[in-house]
Image (cartoon, rainbow, N blue to C red):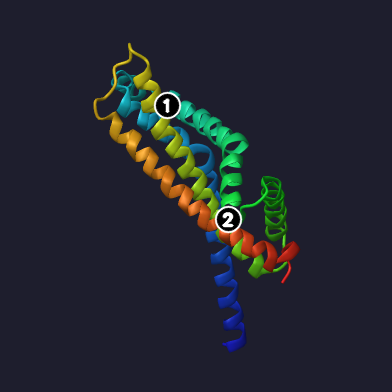
Amino acid sequence: MNPMNSTENTKETMNSTVNAVDKIISNLGTILRFFAPGFAALFVIAFVLIDTRDFLKSDYEIVAILGILLGVSIYSLHKDFITRYLWFIIVWIHRGGNPLSSYKLLNDLDEQRWYRQLSEDKIIRGMQNKLDVWSNMLNFQYCLSYIMIGIPLLARSIPCVKTNCKSYIVFIAGFLVLLVTLLSEYRMTYWEIQYKDKYKNGER
């Protein structure tokens, strides 16, 4: 057996394995972004609102549909409205100064991220893939914190709704999740700013 052929076959196998792992990670990111928040919301609802448990156990098809619809809605609300303001504040904390300069930096970070995602340089694209996976997890954590804070707060504000006496635990945990997510976002933004200047337009 030719050693060169064996080496080439090994490299091809390794590349195929890496590509398969990348696809799995990409699909996992899609699940975390769009679907997981909805089912997390149903879980929190079942814990906080005692009367909903029997309904959620009665029909799994309806639960699946509700979970998907809620997940897409929560993620869209986060991505289209909330996250932009949160990220602006984090960028402003990083750089300070005029808010207009922070807003310009925000747009520059978006543009340079797209360049890195489309870069022909495998190393740059691979580094950006790592940031994208990190970002997907943060998006899920943001959505989870909204759910854990919002549902107990809304349930407690309605007098006729019977709530779990331990729902305050979910509420407090939601704030902790949000705090950890913001700290992680702050750290990731640091790397985004570093990469913006180091890999201008997706090039080394």
Does residue 129 sit above or below 89 in this rendering?
A: below
Secondary structure type for disc 1 = helix
User: Label 1, on which residue?
Assistant: 63
Residue 51 x/y as whole percent: 30, 18
Task: Give left or right: position of 113 versus 135.
Answer: right
The one nearer the camera, 172 or 18, is 172
The one nearer the camera, 191 or 122, is 191
Identified at 48% across, 48% down, the residue is 182
Does residue 8 sit above or below 14 in this rendering?
A: below
Which label's residue is closer to the chain start, 1 or 2? 1
Looking at the rendering, in which quadrant would you find the N terminus?
A: bottom right
Residue 93 x/y as whole percent: 56, 51
Residue 53 x/y as whole percent: 31, 23
Distance CA(mark 1)–CA(mark 2): 42 Å
Task: Give left or right: position of 140 versus 112.
Answer: left
Identified at 71% across, 57% down, the residue is 112
Residue 42 x/y as whole percent: 40, 29
Which marked residue is nearer to the observer: mark 1 or mark 2?
Answer: 2
User: Label 2, on which residue?
Assistant: 94
Looking at the rendering, in which quadrant would you find the C terminus?
A: bottom right
Q: Amino acid at mark 1?
A: Val
Q: Say if residue 25 shows up in the picture.
A: no
The one nearer the camera, 24 or 112, is 112
